[in-house]
Amino acid sequence: MSFRKEYLMSLAGKSKTESVKLCSTMKRIHILFATLPLFFISCMETNQTQTNQASEADVLIDEKVDSLLALMTIGEKVGQLNMYNGTWEFTGPVPANDNSQDKANMIKSGGVGAMINVLTAEGTRAAQRMAVENSRLGIPLLFGYDVIHGYKTMMPVPLAQAASWDPEVARSGSQVAALEASAAGVHWTFAPMVDVSRDARWGRIVEGAGEDPYLTSVMAKAWIDGYQGDDLSASHTIAACAKHYAAYGFAEAGRDYNTAEVSMSTLHNVILRPFKASSEAGVATFMNSFNDVNGIPATGSQYLLRDVLKGAWDYQGFVVSDWGSIKEMTVHGYSRDKKHAAQLALAAGSDMDMESKAYEEFTEELIAEGGSSMEHLDDAVRRILKLKFQLGLFDDPYKYCDTEREKQSMLTAENMAVARDAARKSMVLLKNQNDLLPLKKDIRSIAVIGQLAASKDTHLGNWRAQAIGDSGVSLLEGIKNAVSPQTTITYSEGYKLVQGERSFIKELDVIEGDRSGFRDAIALAKKSDVVLLAIGEDCFQSGEGRSQVDIGLKGTQQELLMKLLEVNENVVVVLSNGRPLAIPEVVTSAPAVLETWFLGSEAGNAIADVIFGDFSPEGKLPVSFSYHVGQEPFYYSQKSTGRPVPETGDYTHVVWSHYIDSPNEALFPFGFGLSYADFEYKKPKVSVAGAVVEISVNLTNVSDVEGTETVQVYIRDLYASEIQPIKRLVDFQKVKLAAGATQTIAFTLSEEDLGFYKSDGSFVTESGEFEIMIGGNSRDVTSETITVNF
Ligand code: NOJ
């Protein structure tokens, strides 16, 4: 049977009306054999009845996918599972001196389904043409890229965005990122990272929403909504990817890629919750994590992928491996060799192979030998093709390749405004003794000190996609932009933190012991009204492969602070960092501390907005800050030991669970953050009707300035068949209150909020007593105990 005939029949079998329409269209038009399939499917897109119902649209897409699948050879199917890195400039000739020529040939033969790191409207068009115009079926490529917190316009890093506790910050930021990335030909971002992490040593804590599964779930949904919008086929939206599935943030000792040993309770109640939320939010794809979870590499985990994700959650998208994570299963000691790794990963449910080339090399052979099943291969291909249809690539494979749109979309005033607003909302005021902040704009003199203060680069953060180096607004620039003409701004570098090349792929050269700038900085501090001292971390101290055993300040930063305080008591510490820092001496000594993380393109202007009171800080910590690295992993939602330290009495008695050389508690607790306003909570009123808990609390702004508070609800299930944490965030609301105003804030908790996952993965609700706690952070709460009968 001819290919054309087979194609027509396969379609007729799936959808009679459509194929009749299509056949008549076909009769009228002569088309090249090579472009037939693509054209055909495109006709189906335009001829079908428009529907707003996702399920109907899905069914139609499934039919198209099946039709196409029926025509594919095993080789073509395996091709869809391959993701290649774009190692050459696609708009020029393919270089012959590396494996680019082989890759180009593979693309042309239909042996590649997706590419990573191929960019620009022109570049992606050229690469797409290779696939669409040369391969037998003309199946378009999918272009993926790490668009983590912006493409050209940088938003605050994800951890900072989470500090806003404002889903709109996450949504609008990723919407802008999608707008810019899609204009540069990108279809798919490897974000959001929804790994909960409770270990400040882990460098990638900066890429997620922190330590709490509920906050991470809320932000995850917002990030996904921002990237994907409500129509994946729109040319300004891109597919998202929930990563790294799973337990990557629980790397032992905070060392990146390390083993994760987690209980089933922690897996289900903490680690998997944001992934489940992402699946429910309709995230298009998932990415495996590199690590093993309790002895099984996540990439080869039947339990995680087939049983939980594709089984219990009925997830319909596809799973991409992390870079090389299939072949790394052999290094882990799980697979015998790469072929065995390919077999295990496909069987487990990893659908696409990012740069292991394991599926490419072995899947056909494995199927022929009966080592891999055709059913698994077809399932993986179906999922990948489905996304290509959803993105509209069969309709127009070049729809994201518009050079004019690309030119107009980047770094626009609108995008910058979103970045500045997000940055303002992401800062956390940690200390403000005697209301040192906000400063007056006509203050006589300010000394801005620190290498980080003049950096136009560090606030762009790690994982900065196509941000232009040194393009951010520095703290120094932001301050200069904001002050009155009478104000004198002076700058001194003070300390040197880093030197040499700083980049994603290079180890950072951190300087220890440099005091050459001290004298100048101290002299400026002495003659200024206020000192703004920028200290913390360079942005390349956190991110992938950037774990640290020391989570304090590197170099001479702290020493300089102490010297400055000797000559000027008004030192405002402006912190930038990608992880919680253990800095008790800084916090005790400095009168004001503002946490700014890495705030993106508009950092300096946004910091000035807060420093001069144009914007009252409203961020809250998405991670606890410990006193000492020895407390890590450190988090608020701990379980009670049988010997907790009593609230009153002898704190240091040897029989209590404590350290003899460090406090137990947080330097700053999860959820903590000050405002220029002050808020007072009344005791909450809590009522129970069946299994529904109604809570209301009166919140008063007791200051004379407007401010925004984040009201947080925590619960404790006081006794349960498996011990529950002493506190668990279940809801929150941001409330803006005018000076002196009072508002009643109401919350409703459902069975889902009160229940928990047991170690066997089942979700249960158990009748009994619950403590309901409300407050402005996880430590300072007012509470009420209730009994709930399910
Ligand atoms: C490895 C990282 O773990 C992952 O987060 C990223 O998306 C891929 N590399 C692709 O760059």
Image (cartoon, rainbow, N blue to C red):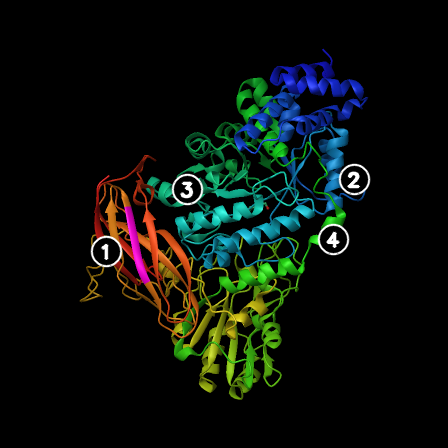
Amino acid type of the residue tagged 4 in the rendering: Lys
Which disc, if any, is residue 450?
Answer: none
CA gap, disc 4 and disc 3: 40 Å
**Residue type at the position of mark 1:** Glu
Q: Which is more foreground, mark 2 or mark 1?
A: 1
Q: Nearer the viewer, residue 228 or 645?
A: 228
- Mark 3: secondary structure: helix
Cα gap from disc 2 to disc 1, whole angstroms: 72 Å
Q: Dots 2 and 1: beta carbons under 8 Å?
A: no
Residue 653 is situated, as x and y percent measured from the top left of the image, at: 19, 64
Of the numbered discs 3 and 2, the one sitting upstream in the chain is 2
- Sequence order check, earlier mark of 3 and 1: 3
Residue occupied by mark 4: 407
Q: Residues within 10 Å of mark 3 (few under 14, many from 20)?
A: many
Coordinates of residue 348 in the picture (x, y in percent): 48, 30
Instruction: State the residue position of label 2.
Output: 96
Most frequent secondary structure within the magenta stretch: strand
Look at mark 1 in the image and give the residue it sits on: 784
C-alpha separation, residue under disc 3 versus residue under disc 1: 29 Å
Q: Residues within 10 Å of mark 2 (few under 14, many from 20)?
A: few
First-in-chain label (2 vs 1): 2
